[in-house]
Structures are given as structure tokens and as C-alpha cells.
Amino acid sequence: MRHIFLIFILICLCQSPQPALGENKKPDSEARLNKKEVMNEAYRRFWNQNVQNKIDQDIERYRKADAVVRLKGLAEGTEVKIEQVSHDFLFGGNIFLFGDCGSFEKNKRYEETFGTLFNAATIPFYWKTLEPEEGKPRYEAGSSYEYRRPPTDPVVDFCESKGINMNGHAIIYGMRKWGHPVWMPDERKKMEVYFEKHIRELAKRYHGRLQRWDVVNEPTDQANRGIMPDNYTFKSFLWAIKYFPDSVKFNINDSDMHWDMSFYRRYLEIVRNLTDRGIKIDNVGMQMHIFNPEESRRIASGADILTPEKIYERLDYMSGAEKPLHVSEVTVSAPDDTEEGKAIQAEIAKNLYRLWFSHPNVMGITWWNVVDGGAAPGEPSVSGIYDKELNCKPVYHILDKLINKEWKTNTVLKISNDETVRFRGFKGRYIVSWKDKNGNQQQAEFDLKNDGDGIQTF
């Protein structure tokens, strides 16, 4: 966005069918995907036509609503343009590489992802790197550099300017090794004072600017958490409730869809215990990380991993919390950097996103590492939707097709004899445009969330 021309180029490069930076064409892997040659027959049996039909039916049932647009004074047959401009469902990514992609052009491509593909962003507030020196937090632009941990103020400003829904991740991390500054004392009671102070300061600085916060991240594995205040999860939520405005939504985040049901039983028990004690939990986070590239290859070969049956089982079980579910951290590693490997990544992601989007209790999905090579140490380097040069990978095109084409409603309808147009559309915000009886262009906006929502002019 240095110049208008550059903005135009950056935006257009990721729009299908235009090639991305450094790409001459869409990879041949997309053609092979259509032929289903990159996935084994055993994989396709898991994701068979009956499963796909159920997904389609559930998307139609749970992600759409019937709209009614009444435009008084319009003659029968007048054309009305219906354009969906945003989703009610949250499609997000972590924004951990903000300003750190290596060049002006790459940084701008990265930024354009938010608002073009994703309508939500997870912002890193890991206390360990947010305040490496006591009393000197890294909020402001120009703060000391930390990999994958940009100063938070510029990221919040950017997301606010683009209308991006923000999730602060995380106020308190359940495992001290990853979450807390090295200067934190080793005494439980003393730690409590710092915990409350930290939560109070975040609430004072950001108030209601971030729509959501992961108040506590990964509290379930208590055996490996290190020294923490007694009952810290309950107390952290209490302090968040005390200091943040009521408009802010509070999340708890844990689990992985790979893990066995014994972990989920413990996780659900923790969530229920907190809510029974009066704690406000608005969303329950569920993670899904394919960190091992070899695991993706095994999935493509038909291994009994992350099958529809297992994913439904975990989603349905955690729906017992009676809270919306956020698929909060998604890693789908490609088996390798070949075209076939990228195609496998895209096919796995397509089926997972479709199933998650179809489930009535899922409110959002967040891709974790947006760029290859941008993961935490020890995590895979080929799990991005972009390669290291910020070229769109096949998985980008798959998600773009789902989010911006298949799952958006755009149409032109004609007014009936009762001055009404009716349609069933994906839930979100709409702009309706028409010409009045004098030939003047008119438009109005509305949010479609429930059957019957729409516009009525007088």
C-alpha cells in the first residue's frame, strides 16, 4: 500500500484465477485433486459421498437463513442486487508474523490476508514475551524484537482499521514454561498478585477493543504445568470478569482432536465446573494440529486418523458444555514441499473445514501458521497457506473458494407482485441495491442471522 498501483497488484495477485507472487499458474496439483489421485481410496472411503451429503445438508440447515426484503413502491420485475459483504461465522488466522515477513511487499501481502480471506485474527499476548522485563511490557511500536511476538498496539490498530474480529491469546497460559516471564516468583501466593495485576493492566489498556480473549490457555494438563497459583483458572476468570467490560467474550482453550476421549472428559469437567461456579465462558476452544508431515501422508494413505467419525465424536462431546465451540488452532502440514504434498494438504484442509463449518455448535475456525517457515521452533515448516515467498499455495485457493465463493450469497432477484424478494442466504451482512421508480440508485444494509431478517422500506 505504498502507492495505489502497488495496492492493486497485491490484492489482485491472490484473486483466482490470477497467479500469486512468483507463480506462473495454479499448480497441477489442483487438477490431480479433481481426479482424486493424490488421496488413497481408503481415505476417500472415510470421506465418502454419504459423509459429504450430510455435510452439505448441515451447511444448508445451520449456516443459512431465510431473508425477506420488502421494497415499497417498486414495480413487479424490478431487479434487486443481493451482495453478501461479510460472514457471521469467524474465519481467522494467527497474526504472529505481522511486520516480520522480510520485505515491504511480503508484509503487505500478509496483511491483505486479513480482510480478504480471514475476517478474524488471533493476536499474541503471551506474557513471557509481552513483558520479558518486569514493568516494561512490549505494547508499543518500536519495542524490542521477539520472533512471532509483534508489539501488540500496532496489530490491534491494524485489525481495528480493517474491521477484523480480534482474539487475544492468551492472558494466562496454563503451562508456566511457555506462558510466564522468567522473573515470575516461585511462590503460589505471590504469583496471584502478579496474575491479577496483569489482567487488570490488559483490561485497562485495551478495554473492549478486542472482542475475545483466551483467558486461560491449556489448563487441563495439570501434571506438567509447573508452579501455578492454587485454583488459578477460576481466579483468572474472576479477575477478567471484574476488570473487562461486559461486551468482551471470554474463552477457554485446550485439547486437540487427535487426543483420546479421556482428555476430553477432563476438559469438559473443568468447563462445567467453572460455569457451575458462576464463571462466564462464552466460547470453548478446541485445537487441531497435524504437526508431523508424515502424519499427513498417512492420512492421505487412509490411516484411521482424524476421520469424520472421530471429529464428530469430539465436537458432539464438547457440545455438552452448552457453549459455542471455536476450532481455535489449526495446523495442516503438507507431507513435503512438492506439488503432490501441497495438494494433499489442500484436500485434508478442505474436508476438515467443510465438516467444521457444517457443525451447528462451531462458531469459528482459526488457521494457525499462515506462512511456511513461520511456525514456532519444532513445528512444521510447510503448514502455511502461503509458501516462504508469500505465494499462494493450493490450500489458499481451496479456502478462498469455500469462504469467498461457495459460502457467500450473491445474486440478482426480481421483485414479486407483493413488492418482496425472498432468498435463503449464508448468515452475515448484506448490501441490497435497486433503482427506485424515478431511476435513482438506492441501497440498504442488513444482518442476516435468523429466518425473517431483512429490510422493509416505507
Image (tube, rainbow, N blue to C red):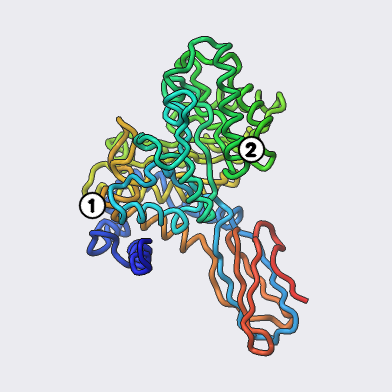
151 sits left or right of 239 in the view? left
Above or below, 274 relative to 6:
above
Quick one: which residue is furthest to the right in this view? 458
Above or below, 225 relative to 14:
above
Q: Quadrant of the C terminus?
A: bottom right
Q: Quadrant of the N terminus?
A: bottom left
Task: Give the label, 2 or 1, closer to the camera.
Answer: 2
Above or below, 123 relative to 78:
above
Q: Nearer the viewer, residue 309 or 274?
A: 274
Q: Position of residue 403 (x, y in %)?
A: 47, 57
Q: Residue at x 31, y 54 (%)?
A: 104
Q: Position of residue 175 (x, y in %)?
A: 46, 21
143 sits left or right of 242 in the view? left
- The answer to which image quadrant residue 299 occupies is top left
156 sits left or right of 28 in the view? right
Q: Which residue is mark 1?
A: 339
Q: Position of residue 356 (x, y in %)?
A: 50, 46
Tag 2: residue type? Answer: Asp
Q: Which residue is mark 2?
A: 282
Tag 1: residue type? Answer: Glu
Q: Residue at x 53, y 70 (%)?
A: 410
Q: Nearer the viewer, residue 445 or 358?
A: 445
Query: Can residue 354 be seen by looking at this rendering?
Result: yes
Labelled disc at residue 188: none
Give the Cα separation between the discs numbered 2 and 1. Answer: 40 Å
User: Between disc 2 and disc 1, whose residue precedes?
Assistant: 2
User: Could you say whether the residue bearing mark 2 is in a helix, strand or loop?
Assistant: loop
Above or below, 150 relative to 195:
below
